[in-house]
Image (cartoon, helix red, strand yellow):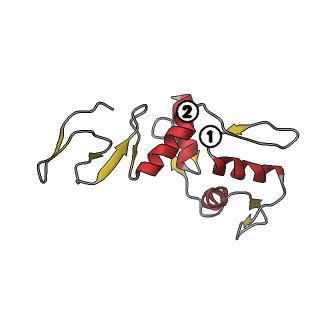
């Protein structure tokens, strides 16, 4: 992001180094320099950059059949659960269980609550916005 003087319209306060901007409702946002995705907190922007734009892997899986690398420690911890049978998140409707809560929520929304997110371009349905975004990126 370029550094230049940015004037906040509400109070005419001038920022010399702009790490964040204000949206039309005067809420602080932190935009990514590389993909223009916006975040409400600077920590979320930092995590996004580590996960999506930095190829530096500091944390590696030590399972004998795997050598995946991760840029943040929590991603490795989440990954390690895939090597165990510890599926702590159980569906309230059927006997499926999951390693991550987000996978349980997606499963229940799609299969039991019948909540689906439809692609505007081809009408294919997905059980969460992340899968829809991958579809849009890869198919359109």
**Which SS class for mark 1?**
loop
x then y, percent, for residue 90: 73, 66
Q: Looking at the rendering, which quadrant does residue 103 occupy?
A: bottom right
Viewer-proximal residue, 121 or 8? 8
User: In this view, which residue lies farthest toward the front?
Assistant: 16
Q: Give the mark, 2 or 1, whose residue is nearer the N terminus.
A: 2
User: In this view, which residue lies farthest toward the bottom?
Assistant: 92
Assess whether mark 1 and mark 2 are in contact (beta carbons under 8 angstroms): yes
Q: Looking at the rendering, which quadrant does residue 101 occupy?
A: bottom right
x then y, percent, for residue 107: 66, 57
**Label 2 – label 1 distance at C-alpha:** 8 Å
Which mark identifies residue 54?
2
Q: Is residue 6 left or right of residue 134?
A: left
Q: Which residue is mark 1?
A: 71
x then y, percent, for residue 127: 59, 51
Viewer-proximal residue, 91 or 58? 58
Q: Is residue 31 left or right of residue 3?
A: right
* Above or below for 81 versus 92: above
x then y, percent, for residue 100: 68, 57
**Which SS class for mark 2?**
loop
Q: Residues within 10 Å of mark 2 (few under 14, many from 20)?
A: few
* Above or below for 59 versus 99: above
User: In this view, which residue lies farthest toward the right?
Assistant: 64
């Amino acid at each position: 992001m370029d550094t230049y003087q940015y004037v906040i319209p509400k109070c005419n306060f001038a920022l010399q180094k702009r790490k964040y901007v204000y949206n039309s409702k005067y809420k602080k946002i932190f935009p990514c320099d590389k993909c223009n995705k916006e975040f409400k907190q600077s920590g979320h922007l930092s995590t996004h950059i580590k996960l999506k734009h930095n190829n530096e892997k500091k944390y590696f899986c030590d399972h004998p059949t795997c050598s995946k690398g991760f840029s943040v420690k929590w991603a490795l911890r989440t990954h390690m659960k895939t090597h165990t049978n510890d599926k702590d998140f159980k569906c309230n409707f059927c006997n499926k269980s999951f390693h991550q809560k987000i996978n349980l929520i997606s499963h229940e929304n799609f299969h039991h609550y019948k909540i689906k997110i439809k692609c505007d371009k081809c009408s294919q349905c997905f059980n969460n916005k992340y899968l829809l975004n991958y579809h849009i990126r890869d198919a359109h």
